[in-house]
Image (cartoon, rainbow, N blue to C red):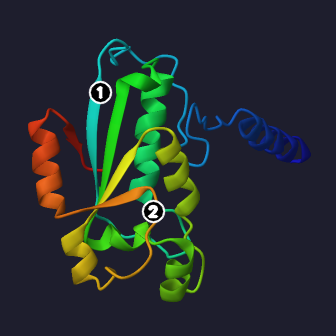
């Protein structure tokens, strides 16, 4: 029995030491991913990627990073990890519907949710790395957020629908995280 317990502990500890850690190739504040050395190469390192990401989902909890925003960061990190140069990745994020409050700057977010915006650092890091963000002006009005201060990385669009149709007409692929 004693040997069985020791063997079981060895297996548990052994599994913990071999647990794979997430990597953050470019965006360090989110979008963690696993290395997949056995993956068949798909990304075209010479291609210019034009991607528009729908950010319409609410955060699970006000104190957590928005899952769709984290997936946008993972999208960037995945392309970098696949060997696509940063200058070949053009990403646009569009906040609307339930995702609209994510755009609030810290004080405005604090007024609404009682804490600083947990998305601020990730939005800022993505912005510094070339990701462009828009928020739907219709959603700002529908959610009564039009007069609230927004993160400086986010521009107001007339509507998410026009933003999607315009960028998709210019060849951007729509990503629905």
Q: Within 10 Å of the Cα at label 1, are there few (<14), some (14-19), or many (20+) other Cα atoms? A: many
The mark found on residue 66 in the picture is 2
Relative depth, front residue between 8 and 38: 38
The residue that appears at 52% across and 62% down in the rendered structure is: 119
The residue that appears at 71% across and 32% down in the rendered structure is: 18
Q: Is residue 44 above or below residue 130?
A: above
Whichever of labels 2 and 1 marks the residue nearer the N terminus, that label is 1
In the rendered image, the residue lying farthest to the right is 2
* Eye-nearest disc, 2 or 1: 1
Mark 2–mark 1 distance (CA, rounded to whole Å): 23 Å
Q: Is residue 94 above or below residue 96?
A: above
The residue that appears at 26% across and 32% down in the rendered structure is: 50
Q: Position of residue 15 (x, y in %)?
A: 71, 37
Image marks 2 and 1: residues in contact by CB distance under 8 Å: no
Q: Is residue 26 left or right of 168 when viewed as pictured?
A: right
Q: Is residue 104 left or right of 49 when viewed as pictured?
A: right
- Residue placed under numbered mark 1 in the picture: 49
Relative depth, front residue between 104 and 1: 104
């Amino acid at each position: 029995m004693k040997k069985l317990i020791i063997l079981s502990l060895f297996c548990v500890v052994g599994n913990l030491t071999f647990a794979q850690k997430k990597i953050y190739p470019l965006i360090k504040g989110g979008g963690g991913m696993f290395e997949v050395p056995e993956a068949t190469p798909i990304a075209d390192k010479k291609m210019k990627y034009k991607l528009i990401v729908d950010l319409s989902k609410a955060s699970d909890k006000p104190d957590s990073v928005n899952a769709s925003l984290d997936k946008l960061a993972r999208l960037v990190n995945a392309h970098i990890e696949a060997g696509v140069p940063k200058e070949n990745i053009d990403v646009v994020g569009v906040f609307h519907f339930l995702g609209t409050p994510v755009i609030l700057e810290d004080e405005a977010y604090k007024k609404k949710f009682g804490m600083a915006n947990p998305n601020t650092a990730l939005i800022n890091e993505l912005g510094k790395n070339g990701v462009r963000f828009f928020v739907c002006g219709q959603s700002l009005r529908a959610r009564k957020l039009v007069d609230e201060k927004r993160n400086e990385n986010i521009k107001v669009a007339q509507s998410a629908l026009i933003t999607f149709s315009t960028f998709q007409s210019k060849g951007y692929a729509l990503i629905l995280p």
